[in-house]
Image: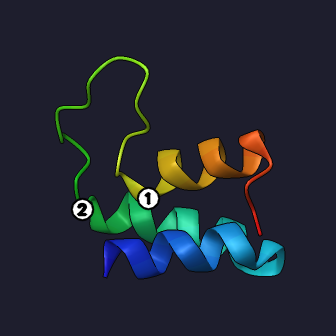
């Protein structure tokens, strides 16, 4: 579910804010321990970082 939400936010700019809001509300993997130089699997962070890197497909 989290990967699906992130993918929607990454590939559909018109739904990006809604996907990030839903990720914040659900909080799935919010506290997941993430090593340095890795992207968090928390959807709002994952979406922002992937879009920032230009990997939006």
Q: Give the residue drawn at x 50%, y 45%.
A: 45
Q: Give the residue drawn at x 53%, y 65%.
A: 21
User: Where in the figure is residue 33, as x and y percent of width and height?
Assistant: 17, 32
Q: Residue farthest to the top? A: 36
Q: What residue is shown with label 2?
A: 28
Q: Earlier in the sequence, mark 2 or mark 1?
A: 2
Q: Is residue 49 left or right of residue 33?
A: right
Q: Is residue 39 above or below residue 5?
A: above
Are discs 2 and 1 less than 8 Å apart at CB?
yes
Q: Is residue 22 left or right of residue 18?
A: left
Q: Secondary structure at mark 2?
A: loop
Quadrant where the C terminus lies?
A: bottom right
Quadrant where the N terminus lies?
A: bottom left
Q: Quadrant of residue 26?
A: bottom left
Q: Residue 43: give its label.
A: 1
Q: Give the residue drawn at x 55%, y 74%.
A: 7
User: Where in the figure is residue 32, as x and y percent of width and height?
Assistant: 18, 41
Q: CA distance from mark 2 to mark 1?
A: 8 Å
Q: Give the residue drawn at x 75%, y 63%.
A: 56
Estimate how packed mark 1 is, as few (under 14), some (14 to 19) or many (20 or more) residues with alpha carbons within 10 Å. many
Disc count in the image?
A: 2
């Amino acid at each position: 579910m989290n990967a699906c939400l992130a993918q929607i936010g990454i590939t559909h700019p018109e739904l990006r804010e809604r996907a990030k809001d839903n990720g914040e509300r659900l909080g799935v993997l919010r506290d997941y321990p993430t090593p340095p130089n890795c992207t968090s699997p928390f959807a709002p962070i994952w979406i922002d970082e992937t879009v920032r890197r230009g990997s939006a497909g």
